[in-house]
Image (cartoon, rainbow, N blue to C red):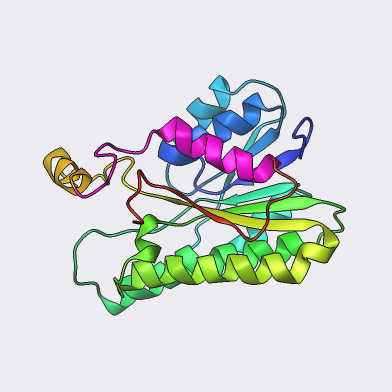
Amino acid sequence: MDFQKKSVLITGGSRRGGAAIAAVFAAAGARVLIHVHTHRDEGAQLLETLPGKGHRMLAADFSRPDAADQLFAEAGRIDCLVNNASFFKLHPQHSDAENALFWQINYEAPKRLMELFAVQNLTQGVVVNILDAAIWHEACDAYTQSRRALGDLTLEFAKKYGARNLRFNAVAPGPMLPPNELPQSKMEKVLQSVPLHRPVDVQDFARAVLFLAQCKSITGAILPVDGGQHL
């Protein structure tokens, strides 16, 4: 897909990997719509740095069941959706409320956005879901399960809507940027189990998202960008 003058909605697009995704799409000529929740200042700063015109910031709290509908209504017609927003907590024991948030933010919200995207009257369009390399591991916590379920949904939508020239793909990144609560020393220990023994380059991750969005012949793909961690 040629992204000149096309609209791209990136959830969680104000910082970290989301900001890198926004930058590569803007450089490709897209009009970028950045969804934020609490990081509005960072979103505003990012908008000032993006090349091109017409970029916007939209706010929504995906812990609310109606947030996806409101966000999509504000965004208007879009040609590409990148479901990047997520909820993650590092500690091993989670409350029922936190487990519910994992499913609401990491699965229900992107699912609803995918449904709304699919009913647009598009002759071509693409969704790229951001997962986690943990989906290939045996972990059964709510975070991993919600990510794994979104991966399964990606394949279902790819089969269901392929005849309409709508494509659905995903990127599963490995260790890239440590969570705020994770000490750098712990990140270094994690990397010892990764075949490449180094973190994923954020620009490599962002370019992988753009590649899946641009390549007209790929749908139903889950691309690991994880330094070989899935192995």
How many numbered circles does the render carry?
0
In-front residue for pair 220/168: 220
Q: Is residue 44 visible?
A: yes
Q: Residue at x 63, y 20 (%)?
A: 51
Q: Is residue 65 visible?
A: no
As drawn, 222 above or below 209 = below
Is 4 placed left or right of 134 in the picture?
A: right
As drawn, 173 above or below 165 = above
In-front residue for pair 72/138: 138
In-front residue for pair 61/200: 200
Locate residue 17, reporting x and y percent. Answer: 44, 39
Q: Quadrant of the C terminus?
A: bottom left
Examine the structure image and report whether residue 113 is included in the region drawn in magenta. no
Is 51 placed left or right of 98 in the picture?
A: right
As drawn, 118 above or below 209 = below
Locate residue 159, reporting x and y percent. Answer: 71, 69
Locate residue 135, reporting x and y percent. Answer: 39, 64
Is 231 placed left or right of 206 in the picture?
A: left
In-front residue for pair 58/109: 109
Q: Quadrant of the N terminus?
A: top right
Residue 165 sits in which quadrant?
bottom right
Q: Residue at x 46, y 57 (%)?
A: 131
Residue 197 sits in which quadrant?
top left
Locate residue 229, reporting x and y percent. Answer: 32, 52
- Residue numbers of the magenta segment: 193-214
Farthest residue, direction bottom: 96
Q: Residue at x 82, y 59 (%)?
A: 120
Examine the structure image and report whether residue 209 is included in the region drawn in magenta. yes
As drawn, 201 above or below 100 = above
